[in-house]
Image (cartoon, grey):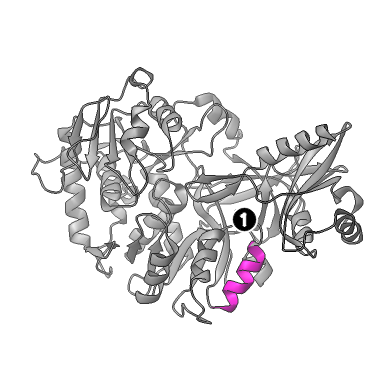
Amino acid sequence: MSANAFSLQSLIRTEAAADPAFVFDGTPVSRAQFSAKIDQTAAWLAAQGIGKGDVIAVWLVNRIEWVALLFAAARLGAVVAAVNTRYRSAEVAHLLKVSGAKLMVVEAAFRSIDFAAILADVDKFDVPTLQRLAVVGADTIPAHWPCVRFDAFDTAYPPAPPPQDDVDLPVLLYTTSGTTKGPKLVAHSQRTLATHAASVVKALTLSPQRHSLLAMLPFCGTFGMTSLLGFIAAGATIHVLDAFEAAPALKLLREHRITHSFGSDEMFRRILALTDVPRPFPHLEVCGFAAFQPGWRELAAEAGARGMPLFGLYGSSEVQALFSIGRVDDAFADRIEGGGWPMSPDAKVRVRDTETGELAAQGVSGEIEISAPSRFLGYFNNPEATREAITADGFFRTGDIGHLRGNRAFVYETRAGDAMRLGGFLVAPGEIEDELKSCTGVTDAQVVAVDLKGQARCVAFVIPSSEPPRQEALVARLRERLAGYKVPARIYVVEAFPVTDSANGVKIQRARLRAMAMERIAAE
């Protein structure tokens, strides 16, 4: 099979494909128009001096320019560094510095985001490789760098050089969730992206004429980009939200007979809350969701009863989103769990006991390790981190805790940093949180582990309902329902949990909860 079969260009179907390819804010883009925009963007990039190995930072909301830039960069052998639109100056500076980007394509403005003001706080000397900005939506913005207008679609430039044929070079950089040292950049090639997109099409049995996607996740993250590339490969129509809002999402789902969408539990919760219709989405077939908030099991039950079928899934920047998903014929409880069945028949999942270092048997929790065609090339310009993340036989150490379910399926339980070793056993916080949420007076709950007098114990934070719960009653109920080592040493009532925004949704700051627990215990 030729290398071109694994290029991003190979994903653009023409035979039996639906038209339009995309609908952005009500504006259709046909497949022919999409191909022409890629040609125009490749010519524009070449005119900016971008060639093989050069890095372009793309700081845009979901728009056709984003997709055209990725496909055009692939044609030139250049690399796109995806910048989260939620980023602020320190995060943008870090990404520009680590990626070595020569050019940044940036929004002029979007809703309340002042891109120029954020860039004004980036020290030019901290990002010495950045040469200029290209602005979408305006001629220029106030900046430390020279600005040009992104005018690829309305100005003729000399044709770009012939396409590069090395599909195994980096083409797209995602940022990881980040640490105190700043996020690493996860490098993918055209081959890893295109191969996984084809696996998604096959595993979901996507039909270009029958299926369609509501793209409501940001393209800057693997969750949004993977679903986008999969439906491009399927030749199905993609309806795009520039940024998620529940009301427009509801409107598109209803009016365009959408069959598939992917998002966080909170996104689907907000959409459902806007309608009282018993079954408002008769055409929906698959809503793949990542569970970031408490109460996701209850949400899945309610959504299922109202015709919004939620499917648990698994993914990461390193192995790509939609790595795996639940199946229609799974029992409901299994279908909604994180994990599921790998999309690719060539993917391998194993679990390693975190105590013994040995491979774990089915049903035994440990760290999930993955080998798959969707696996990343490595961390960009960070060989040491890459070596630490990949085993000698090529498996990615995910840092996630889970167990094998049998017959290639697996269950994701929690992040390794969130898993608690209590009483000598590995415990997922969700198990204790679910019991707390079943107690009278508790709306939501979060549980973290702390060191209490030299012993690992768990501490719970609960958000009360109208009648606050009594700690004694909660402890008594938990003692009836759980092993003693799982019963929280302390239960604190709070008005809200500390949260942070990510590309894919709002996430609980568990590290902050641990710090809060230690502060409160120390004050006693």
* Residue 344 x/y as whole percent: 51, 56
Classify 21 as above or below 413. below
Query: Left or right: 502 with respect to 28?
Result: right
Residue lying farthest to the top in this orientation: 125
Q: Say which quadrant the C terminus sits in.
A: top right
| Residue 473, quarter of picture | bottom right
* Residue 416 x/y as whole percent: 68, 42
Q: Which residues are drawn in magenta?
A: 296-306
Camera-side residue: 321 or 121? Answer: 121
Residue at (8, 44) in percent of width and height: 156
Camera-side residue: 400 or 218? Answer: 218
Query: Left or right: 487 with respect to 152?
Result: right
Classify 211 as above or below 422. below
Classify 152 as above or below 100. below
Camera-side residue: 96 or 229? Answer: 96
Helix, strand or loop: magenta stretch? helix
Dot 1 surroundings within 10 Å: few (below 14), some, or many (20 or more)?
A: some
Residue denoted by label 1: 293
Query: Left or right: 209 with respect to 309?
Result: left
* Residue 290 x/y as whole percent: 56, 56
The secondary structure type at the circle numbered 1 is loop
Classify 298 as above or below 266. below
